[in-house]
Image (cartoon, grey):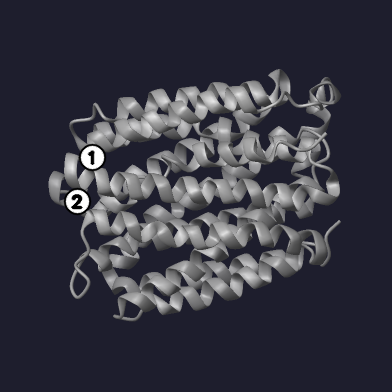
Amino acid sequence: MRPPTFGVVLAGFAAFLDLYATQPLLPTLAHTFGASSFAVSLTVTAATVAVAIAAPLTGRLADRVGLRRVIIASAYALAVATGLAATARTLPELVAWRFVQGLVTPGVFAVAMAYILEEWPPERVGRGAAAYVSGTVVGGFTGRATMGVVASHEGWPVGFLVLAAANLAAAVALTAMLPRERGRERRAGRESAAARALLRRPALVATYAVGFCVLCAQVAMFTYITFPLAAPPFGLSSAALGWLFAVYLVGAVVTPISGGWIDAYGHRATLAVAFGLGVVGALLTLTTVLPAVIVGLSLFATCIFVAQAAASSHVGVHAAEARGLAIGLYATCYYVGGTVGGALPASVWERGGWSACVAFIVVVLTIMLAIAWRGWTPAAA
């Protein structure tokens, strides 16, 4: 049977539609609420903290009751939580609703990846993971661009309502399109023994550390780049900042190709390519020429999505059992990294500006490659 490619692409779209939607709003929120850059960055980090907390629990639940069931239920819950975020009237209220959004996101994000590992033939897992990541790319861009444009004309609460409607449509489509997984019966009764072994596998531990670095770098880049771009000499509005995330669409084109690289040349070699793209892209954002900055962000976005495809599919190579839990643990480390990437650069930005933030990002990418080079096998399994 042909793997349900469009269904997992749609799941990736739904999972990332809301998660970083407030990034283009940060300068506006800082002005509206009279808050610091750190305070408004909590609208990003609250969601990633919640994902990190909920992911392992969601993974265990999915291994018990079924992957498809959890994906669909979480997609509907995400639509409700996104709509409720529009009711916030203060920054703490908005942060609280963002936390709720994060709690229900792993049911789509982590479980969809486990679904791929269960349903795709082993020799095509890299392609399946890349297709899913492409969906996350489009979802991430759509959420940010929609929020930036709608907020600039109607206000950010209306932006959340529009995203909630999109979430609901995605949930309905997933209900109709995503077939029940074939592997649920094989997982019954084996989860506990497999779970105890997961953290004793060095390759998995290394992959979890790589995931931490990937999202740490991504959130640091796309959260704090909004501040220099909103200031002179650029002076971009929230709508323009939202459209800036169109650079993600470059990643949407390249990431499916990277699935073939993973299957042909291995996870480690693919991650090395991603590292090179990321460092060059980060350095280009130091210029004061907007087209050069956009090229740099495009390269950096491509780096992140290729690295994510390599890391998430690498989990499947080393987690034949309890895949929902294995991906849940990966998601926890991934989003802990996102939390660090959202919070720690605030002090870096205050002390050294954007150049210091870029140095921080390059260091994180270097650590990512070093961990993979030592802990991953040189060729795909």
Which quadrant holds residue 242? bottom left
Contact flag, marks 2 and 1 (Cβ < 8 Å): yes
Can residue 328 be seen here? The reply is no
Residue at image x 59%, y 76%? 276
- Number of callouts in the render? 2
- 167 and 86: which is toward the camera: 167
Residue toward you, 175 or 115: 175
Closer mark to the observer between disc 2 and disc 1: 1
- Image coordinates of residue 160 in percent, x first then y, are 31, 34
Q: Residue 346's image quarter?
A: bottom left
Task: Name the residue beneath numbered marker 2.
Answer: 28
Q: Is residue 42 above or below residue 73?
A: below
| Image coordinates for residue 280, horizontal then vertical, percent | 51, 78
Mark 2 surroundings within 10 Å by alpha-carbon count, few (fewer than 14), some (14 through 19), many (20 or more)? many
State left or right for residue 260 relative to residue 218: right
When the figure is inspected, residue 109 is found, relative to residue 297, above or below; the finding is above
Q: Is residue 173 above or below residue 350?
A: above
| Residue type at numbered disc 2 | Thr
- The reply to whether residue 246 is visible in this rendering is yes
| Residue for point 19% across, 40% down | 155
**For the residues marked 2 and 1, what is the alpha-carbon distance in whole angstroms?**
10 Å
Label 1 CA crowd tier, 10 Å (few <14, some 14–19, many 20+): many
Q: Secondary structure at mark 2?
A: helix
Identify which amino acid the numbered label 1 is placed on.
Answer: Trp
Between 21 and 342, the residue placed more toward the observer is 21
Q: Is residue 135 above or below residue 104?
A: below
Q: Residue at x 45, y 48 (%)?
A: 140
Mark 1 or mark 2, which is nearer the start of the sequence? Answer: 2
Q: Pointer 1: what residue?
A: 156
